[in-house]
Image: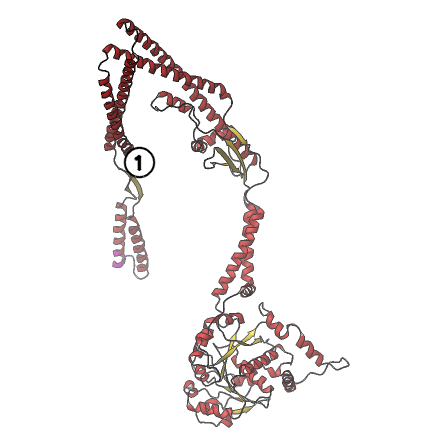
Amino acid sequence: MTKGPASSQQLLSAPSLDIRDYMEIMRRRKAVFIQVFVMVLVVGVIATMLGKPVYQTSTRIMVPVGAPMVNMINVDNPLYAALMMAQPDPVSTQLQMMQTGEFIQDAMKKAGINGSKPGVLPPSPRVAAGEGSNVISVVVEGGDPVQISELANAMVELHKQNMDDARNQGLRKAISFVERELGKKTKDLEDAKLRMLEFRKTHRIIEEKTQQEAKAKAYSDLETEVRHAENALTSTRSQAAQLRTMLAQEPPERTTELRKDNPARDPLVQRIAKLKAQRLDKLDVFTEDSPEVKELDGRIAQTEAQLKSEPETVTERVRTPNKRYDYLQTQLEELEVDLPKLQAAYDALSARFAVQTREVQDLSPDELELARLNAQYDRLQANVNELSEHLQNMQMRKEASSASPFRLLQKAGVPGAPVRPRKSTNLLLSFVLAIVLAGGAALLQEYLDDRVNSPDDVERMTSLPALGHVPLIGPDSPRMVSALPTNSHVAEAYRALRSSVGFAGIDAPLRRLQVTSASKGEGKTVTSVNLAAAMAMDGKRVILVDADLRRPSLHRVLQVPNACGLSEVLAGMKSLDEAIQDTENENLKVICAGPIPPNPAELLGSRTFDQVIEQLEERCDILIFDTPPCIPVTDPVIVAARMDGVILVLHVGQTRKAMVRHAIELLGRARARVLGIVFNRVQSTKSGYYYYNYYYYGDGYYTEAAERGQRHRNGRKKPELGAGAAMAASGRHEDRDG
């Protein structure tokens, strides 16, 4: 049971690309590949060689981390501000200080850098520190290696000097402040002691009982705490009220005026340009004084007056959030959170003070006053002790201030080689980029090129087999296989085509063959003639019919008369025997197209054409029809429905892929059996056809064998055969090959 014709979808199934296909595309598009590769590589080399060298050096310094000199909770104390001046700034603050333009300018002056040298990149410093680290890295890049190393070291030295000066200045101020405060507190302590002794002497209080003294002291301490809590609550309320007043005066948003081009002017400018263009067009037809031109002049003048009345810029008001309002709002919210806590603390102390007041009701006023004096003396004594401790600590730090807490970990050296451009790396990247872009350009050109440039192109878009590859016949070479030498590449290609057609008819005998193409000029007529000649040389009776009733060319190729042909047979004007003509090969007969009829499609689709085919089958073994191209006319589709097999001829390098798809779709709709594709005019010298040359002739086996067969045993060359003898010899050779 024979298989039916394949559908167009099955014939157009395309295999995927593999690495060999991509390599074939690169070889076929080697011209654009080489051009893009050389262009990109040259640009990369020039950019690398002309790039200014950039050197880099770095230095590292470990800075002290801010730690409190003393433990002081009351931040309102002036001593706190003085001591904070002597503390080192956080690392983040130091980084910001070293990145300011003023600091960099001072460092450049310290390094003796007045300006950049001509043609040399100026130094560019960069300061950074790791997260949570107290090591600051200073990296400087520039075109002068000595200059950047001096600048890096100068930046570190200047920062160290500034930090030491700030630390020493803050320490001196703190010591001076503590000395003054200590003198005041010492005098207040002596005065409190005298008042206490004078009170005891005046009221003749020699000693107090321990229990009474404890009650009086607790009463005095609570009184002091209540007073402090009340002051804190009052101060917080006052601050909150002040913030509310300031917040009421600050707007939530600020209005900023921005000036920009007036958008109303652009339409007027475009209208004037359009009117002037219309005026120029009118002047080609009318004069300056014509009403049409004057009307346009009036409109132009009116529009120009409107343009002059419009200002060039307009002011736009932009509303942005007020950052000060947000800050005050945040501070007020924090105080409002603290107020209930302070109120609760004050209420608790007041309750305790009320209880303590009832407990000291049995004490005399003199005893209470003496308790107050004792508590005041104790507080002053504690303040004097604390200030003395602070003074002693700061004096020790002042004595040790000669040793700087900053430690240089790495000094910037003079770099020997630039970090940019890295010529070897850049050249390698340029080479890789050139390959990538060249390959992309080749693939893009391949994608945009719709021509069938190789048999692989057809194999990728259709499942049809390749029946043969016919080389390009030179202008001086014969076009007929009967006139070619036996060992000719073209003759061997047509014999291979004959074998492929024979293999295609093993399961289902092929007696009716049609040769067509997608478009004109692809060599279908020469292919059908040479295929018929090759089959006739193989001993088969072949009748070749020119079914191209629109532009017949078979008679010109075979050089036979076209007076009587297929058109007259189908029209009933001639008999079939009158139309059949003999050729040089007794096994090959020809029927030309005859006069061009007005209705070729109707003749080929008639019942008479079916009867002619049946009569011809009785007279031959193989019946070959040369038909018009598939796409321009419907004749080949009509004929294909009556054939046992259709051969599609393509011109490599000229036929469009879309035309191949369309031709296969048309034949598929006619349910024609497409045997395969013949690639005509293949240039074996182009890349990608090495396999073709090797398969047929590339190894020189057939040529050498033929040359050896043409020599006598004594080494002399045999005489050349004529055209008819050559055809016969070719037929005998094919018989031996089987």
Q: Position of residue 666 (x, y in %)?
A: 43, 78
Q: Nearer the viewer, residue 718 or 216?
A: 216
Q: Residue furthest right?
A: 714
Regarding residue 469, the answer to whether it shows in the image is yes
Using the image as rendered, state which of residue 16 and residue 717 is in the foreground: 16
Disc 1: which residue: 323
As shown in the figure, which amino acid type bears the numbered disc 1? Lys
Against 96, residue 590 (above or below) is below
Residue 362: x and y, percent?
22, 14
Numbered disc total: 1
Q: How is the image coloured?
A: secondary structure
Picture coordinates of residue 508 (x, y %)?
Answer: 51, 85
Where's the C terminus, which quadrant? Answer: bottom right
Residue 200 falls in which quadrant of the image? top left
**Crowd class of label 1 (few under 14; some 14 to 19; many from 20; radius 10 Å):** few
Residue 636 in the figure: left or right of residue 718: left
From the viewer's perspective, tell me whether residue 163 is left or right of residue 308.
right
Q: State left or right for residue 496 relative to residue 190.
A: right
Membership of 375 in magenta stretch = no
The residue lying at 57 percent from left, 68 percent from top is 688
Q: Check the image and report above or below for 95 versus 502.
A: above
Percent position (x, y) of residue 217?
29, 16
Q: Is residue 111 visible?
A: no
Query: In the image, which residues are magenta?
Result: 287-295
Using residue 582 as the reference point, say whether residue 91 is left or right of it: left
Badge 1 marks a residue whose secondary structure is helix
> Which quadrant of the figure has residue 312?
top left
